[in-house]
């Protein structure tokens, strides 16, 4: 969230650095890194659940229970308001805290999301690897070399509109 929340500032306590000190209500424990790592796991679990936050959504292979990468998550394209972008920036700070403290982070993001975070260009194969149904349509469409072959496909071309949450016909 905005910088007026001083949540993520490095602090050294005992061995290693932590970005925040953690105390779980009703549980004992002194935070020398273990509770901090537990909090990272809890944050990742919350990001990867279909609850109220929904900054991440399951990829298409998960939705249709097909092929590989059903466990991968993508950014929710319907979350694009100023507040949403601030929440994504906060997730970036969580990633930064993980890197800074050398703590593993359990986010099962799709390959194209990780590549974009690293400043790399995603490939068509990255996209096809998380949406088997689109891959089948892509292969059929790209193999139709003539208008007759295109018509012979006899397909209704539709795409899932992530912003509206429904299917849209293509002309």
Image: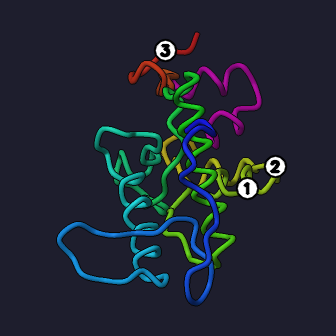
Mark 1 and mark 2 residues within 8 Å of each other at the beta carbon: yes
State which tag comes first along the sequence, 3 or 1: 1
Q: CA distance from mark 3 to mark 1?
A: 30 Å
Q: Position of residue 38 (x, y in %)?
A: 39, 74
Mark 3 and mark 1 residues within 8 Å of each other at the beta carbon: no
State which tag comes first along the sequence, 1 or 2: 1
Mark 2 and mark 3 residues within 8 Å of each other at the beta carbon: no
Graded by Cα atoms within 10 Å as few (under 14), some (14 to 19) or many (20 or more), the crowding at tag 1 reads some
State which tag comes first along the sequence, 2 or 3: 2
Location of residue 169 with respect to 2 vertically, above or below: above
103 left or right, relative to 36: right
Residue 40, visible in the rendered structure: yes
The residue furthest bottom is 15
Residue with the mark numbered 3: 169
Q: Is residue 153 magenta?
A: yes
What residue span does the magenta drawing correspond to? 136-154
Residue with the mark numbered 1: 115
Q: Nearer the viewer, residue 169 or 27?
A: 27
Q: Position of residue 115 (x, y in %)?
A: 73, 56
């Amino acid at each position: 969230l905005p910088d007026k929340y001083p949540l993520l500032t490095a602090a050294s306590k005992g061995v290693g650095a932590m970005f925040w000190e953690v105390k779980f209500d009703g549980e004992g424990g002194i935070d020398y890194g273990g509770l901090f790592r537990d909090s990272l796991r809890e944050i990742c679990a919350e990001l990867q659940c279909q609850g109220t936050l929904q900054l991440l959504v399951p990829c298409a292979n998960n939705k249709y229970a097909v092929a590989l990468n059903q466990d991968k998550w993508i950014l929710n394209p319907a979350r694009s308001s100023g507040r949403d972008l601030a929440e994504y920036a906060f997730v970036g700070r969580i990633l930064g805290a993980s890197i800074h403290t050398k703590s593993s982070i359990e986010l099962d993001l799709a390959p194209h999301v990780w590549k974009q975070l690293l400043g790399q260009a995603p490939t068509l194969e990255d996209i096809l690897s998380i949406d088997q149904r689109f891959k089948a349509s892509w292969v059929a469409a790209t193999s139709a070399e003539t208008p007759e072959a295109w018509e012979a496909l006899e397909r209704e071309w539709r795409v899932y509109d992530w912003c509206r949450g429904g299917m849209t016909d293509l002309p």
